[in-house]
Image: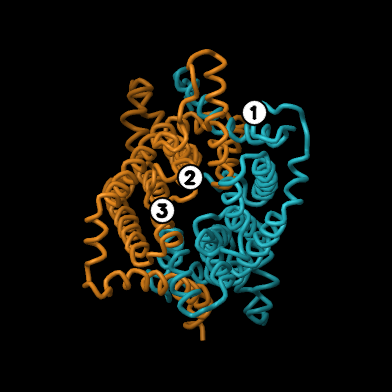
């Protein structure tokens, strides 16, 4: 492998990575500032803005809602996505070709359109609780991640092990839980964690499916930013970045981060 | 028994997508054709309005700019990353994945701090004496483009690192052992083989920019309205749901048309499948 790369290209790459990481360092710095306005580099170091997050009722409530929605929608997506991924890998011949296209529709259709359509044609039309639309909207947008990650794990699974279990008399459900699931465990963990962070960070679906009484953390952040310019938003951002670090550590241990570069 | 196994397992996911996506989105699109004023009245109204046409063209313009800039930056960076030694490559990939997994609100907020009237960029330029008074950088098309490039460059880098790594090393070696200069190898071997990946990246970035909401909302505001922010405003501020549905339909059609077109182009161009 030749490693002679033009020095200008290397300099450019260094600049690109400063561009990528710099703004997030600035957010971190601003969150630690002791001032009542946003500034960088921070003037005085303090954690008071982190305390402030939990003193604002709207942040406390939306953090709980966001965690709830992320946990529930991810669980729904796993429960229906794992069998779907299995079917797509194991029974592909019986299934029509358009099925895999159907399962990537949630990435193809603009999220704003999906959010608006759920509001208009589900929540308002049938007078159903907005929470249901928000929950299933999130389950939909994380479903393609689940199917993709589980499919990748199934691709390296030796199905003859499963056949051996079945031919030795193991019932299908028992085979699923004792043979298949343990073998794709790391895929399930990675799918869970990627889906979870996608749901936590979502704006485009949630923007239409929140309102008085029900909001998620990113939507609350947007609302707060329009009124205040204090370091609270920066400190919430730092909490979200800590979550990102945790997610990356788990993905690295399960799939390997290079999976994301595929 | 086994014949039905596939469908049984796939049906919950199929039902979810059909009930919560296909039907509601189709219903939104259908309502734009069934207004009392006639089947295409909402579209005449949309394209007849100078303001909405401006928003549409601005959105296309911004998305094209973001796509072009991200392609160039992403490709050159991915090229260097894919040839970096193992440990450095891991660090660079981590540095690209981190922003990607950090939410769009946090990443747009960072640019609010940087580009604000009393932001870092303005105060730095003032302190250096380069400008006499703060620049208006927020709520300009430039601010939206910069923040969106920031949003999409990591995605482009990661997509293209994957593509560049899948190019067999033998081809590069064959090219140089036959006497091609590194620049010739890059232009005549690496670049053509990366075209399908560049197309995938371009589609992801274009459709992502075209349908974005948070970034134009925070950094563009009313002054730089785009399709996403206009749709939100029509739906939730002026409560004109027919107009909002029309924008939604235009977005769906353009997004799907671009994906379909690029798929077709990528299939024709991919030298590996010929």
Residue drawn at (47%, 64%) of the image: A115
What residue is shown with label 1? A40
Badge 3: chain ID? B
Is residue A182 among what the camera can see? yes
Measure the alpha-carbon separation of dots 3 and 2. 10 Å
Residues flagged by tags 1 and 3 on a common chain: no
Element assignment for label 3:
helix
What is chain A's hue in the picture?
cyan
| Disc 1 from disc 3: Cα separation | 31 Å
What chain is tagged by disc 1? A
Query: Could you say which is closer to the camera, residue B124 or residue B83?
Result: B124
Between A206 and A43, which is closer to the camera in this rendering? A43
Extreme bottom residue here?
B1
Identify the residue at horizontal 41%, vertical 74% (top origin).
B23
Q: Is residue A67 left or right of residue B199?
A: right
Q: Quadrant of residue B18?
A: bottom left
> At 29% across and 56% down in the image, what residue appears?
B257
- The residue pinned by badge 2 equals B215
């Amino acid at each position: 492998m030749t490693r002679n790369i033009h020095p200008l290209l290397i300099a450019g790459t260094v600049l690109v990575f400063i561009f990528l990481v710099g703004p997030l360092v600035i957010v971190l710095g601003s969150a630690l500032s002791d001032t009542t306005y946003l500034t960088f580099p921070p003037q005085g170091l303090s954690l008071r803005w982190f305390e402030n997050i939990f003193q604002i009722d709207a942040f406390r409530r939306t953090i709980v809602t966001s965690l709830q929605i992320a946990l529930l929608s991810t669980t729904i997506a796993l429960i229906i996505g794992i069998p779907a991924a299995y079917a797509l890998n194991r029974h592909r011949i019986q299934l029509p070709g358009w099925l895999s296209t159907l399962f990537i529709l949630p990435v193809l259709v603009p999220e704003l359109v999906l959010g608006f359509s759920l509001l208009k044609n589900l929540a308002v039309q049938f007078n159903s609780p907005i929470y249901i639309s928000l929950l299933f909207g999130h389950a939909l947008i994380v479903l393609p991640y689940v199917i993709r990650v589980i499919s990748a794990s199934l691709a390296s699974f030796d199905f003859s092990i499963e056949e051996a279990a079945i031919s030795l008399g193991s019932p299908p459900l028992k085979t699923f839980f004792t043979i298949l699931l343990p073998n794709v465990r790391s895929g399930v963990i990675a799918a869970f964690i990627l889906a979870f962070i996608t749901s936590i960070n979502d704006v485009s679906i949630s923007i239409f499916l929140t309102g008085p009484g029900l909001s998620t953390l990113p939507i609350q952040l947007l609302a707060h930013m329009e009124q205040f310019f204090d370091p609270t938003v920066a400190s919430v951002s730092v909490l979200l970045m800590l979550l990102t670090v945790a997610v990356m550590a788990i993905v690295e241990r399960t799939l390997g981060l290079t999976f994301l570069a595929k | 028994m086994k014949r039905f196994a596939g469908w049984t397992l796939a049906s919950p996911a199929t039902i979810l997508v059909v009930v919560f996506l296909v039907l509601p989105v189709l219903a939104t699109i259908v309502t734009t054709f069934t207004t009392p004023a006639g089947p295409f009245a909402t579209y005449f109204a949309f394209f007849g309005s100078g303001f909405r046409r401006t928003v549409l063209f601005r959105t296309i313009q911004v998305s094209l700019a973001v796509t072009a800039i991200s392609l160039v930056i992403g490709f050159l960076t991915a090229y260097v990353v894919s040839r970096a030694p193992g440990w450095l490559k891991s660090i660079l990939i981590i540095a690209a994945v981190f922003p990607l997994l950090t939410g769009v609100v946090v990443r747009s907020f960072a640019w609010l701090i940087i580009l604000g009237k009393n932001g870092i960029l303005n105060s730095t330029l003032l302190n250096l004496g380069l400008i006499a008074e703060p620049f208006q950088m927020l709520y300009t098309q430039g601010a939206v483009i910069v923040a969106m490039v920031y949003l999409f460059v990591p995605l482009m880098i990661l997509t293209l690192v994957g593509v560049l790594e899948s190019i067999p090393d033998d081809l590069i070696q064959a090219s140089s052992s036959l006497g091609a200069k590194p620049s010739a190898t890059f232009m005549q071997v690496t670049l053509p083989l990366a075209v399908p990946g560049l197309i995938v990246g371009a589609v992801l970035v274009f459709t992502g920019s075209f349908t974005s909401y948070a970034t134009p909302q925070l950094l563009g505001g009313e002054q730089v309205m785009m399709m996403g922010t206009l749709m939100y405003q029509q739906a939730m501020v002026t409560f004109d749901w027919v107009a909002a549905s029309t924008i939604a339909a235009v977005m769906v059609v353009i997004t799907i048309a671009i994906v379909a077109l690029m798929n077709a182009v990528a299939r024709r161009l991919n030298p590996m499948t010929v």
